[in-house]
Amino acid sequence: MDSRDEQSLRAAKMYYRDNLSQAEVALALGISRPTTSKLIQHAHDRGFVTITIRDPREASSTTATALATKYGLTSVRLAQPVSQTTDDIVDALGHVGAQALRSLVVDGSSVGVSWGRTMYSIAQHLTEKNVHDVTIVQLKGGMSYTDRKTNDIETITLFCKAFHAYAHTLPLPVIFDNAETKELVEKDRFIANVLEQGRKTDIAVFTVGSAGENSLALNLGSVTPSERTQLRQRAVGDICSRFFDANASVAVQSVDERTVGITMEDLAQRPVRLLVAGGLHKVRALKVALKAGMATHLVTDQACAERLLEE
């Protein structure tokens, strides 16, 4: 290494590492600005300096492609939350989820809709689309026995506004106190028709819940203390309030028998299944759902996607 190399290294370190301007480097080295510029260029030419540009969009695209390949998905979109707080993740998922859904809905679409915090975020981010004859169908009951809000009506209302659609709702508890009452109610002509329409939707948009302590589905006052314990032990998550285990099978039969709404088996038959969920606490549930083929289209966050690719 000759003296010019050494001087160019000094100039490059001051400029790139110490964040000095070229004028400040020139002053420190006692040389002119044009000479400083030439020294910095010399450092580049000699390979002393390399510049790496990390475009998160490119990393996101690579991850999305890998995720689609691994789980046989038609489409994967990744949200980039501004932080890893739950609020920011849900907001980012809602924004990207709304874009994904908007691209799928066309004239005459029938859209099955779940509820939950992520679903409500999607609804809030939806913008109007000029489509006709769209039907929105509620995929599960939404009434709560507690003060925990499901926002089911608000979600349906915003979906209808965005797509100029007509709604078919289920003004019922999502989980009844007993199976006999639930079965009797489901025989009502109006309720039976809504449930049947849910099983025939073109597009289903839904989320995956975790089975943790803060799970909304577990805190609606509709399961017994014994069932709650069983669900914590066996369930990894829920889809449309259908709790499933690590094999994507029914976690607790007595709860499932009292649940009003589409089954996972019927949901898996819908042609387009848009699953929107994220957050590291949902990785396990998401992995089981994806392996079971519950989604054709996925929206999740970057961190969650990377974890889904690890195993």
Image (cartoon, rainbow, N blue to C red):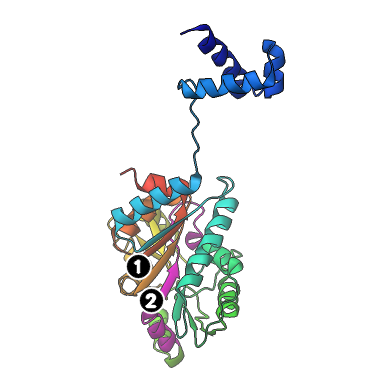
Establish if 243 lies above or below 137: above
Looking at the image, residue 231 sits to the left or right of residue 164; the answer is left
Q: Which residue occupies 59% across, 66% down? A: 125
Q: Quadrant of the C terminus?
A: top left
State the separation of the CA atoms marked 1 and 2. Answer: 8 Å
The residue nearer to you, when weighing 292 against 60, is 60
The residue nearer to you, when weighing 260 against 208, is 208
Q: Which residue occupies 55% across, 70% down? A: 144
Residue 221 shows up from this direction: no
Q: Categorize mark 1 by other alpha carbons within 10 Å: few (<14), some (14-19), many (20+).
A: few
Q: Which amino acid type corresponds to the residue marked 1 in the rendered image?
A: Ser
Q: Are marks 1 and 2 in contact (CB under 8 Å)?
A: yes
* Location of residue 196 by image quarter: bottom left
Tell me the magenta residue range: 191-220
Q: Categorize mark 2 by other alpha carbons within 10 Å: few (<14), some (14-19), many (20+).
A: some
Q: Which residue matches tag 2?
A: 179
Residue 211 among magenta residues = yes
Q: Which residue occupies 43% across, 52% down? A: 282
Q: Which residue occupies 71% across, 19% down? A: 24
For marks 1 and 2, the one nearer the N-term is 2
Q: Which amino acid type corresponds to the residue marked 2 in the rendered image?
A: Ala
Residue 112 is marked as none
* x and y percentages locating residue 207 in the rendered image: 45, 63
Looking at the image, residue 187 sits to the left or right of residue 94; the answer is left
Residue 254 is marked as 1
Establish if 146 lies above or below 191: above
The residue nearer to you, when weighing 14 against 104, is 14
* x and y percentages locating residue 259 in the rendered image: 41, 72
Establish if 52 lies above or below 273: above
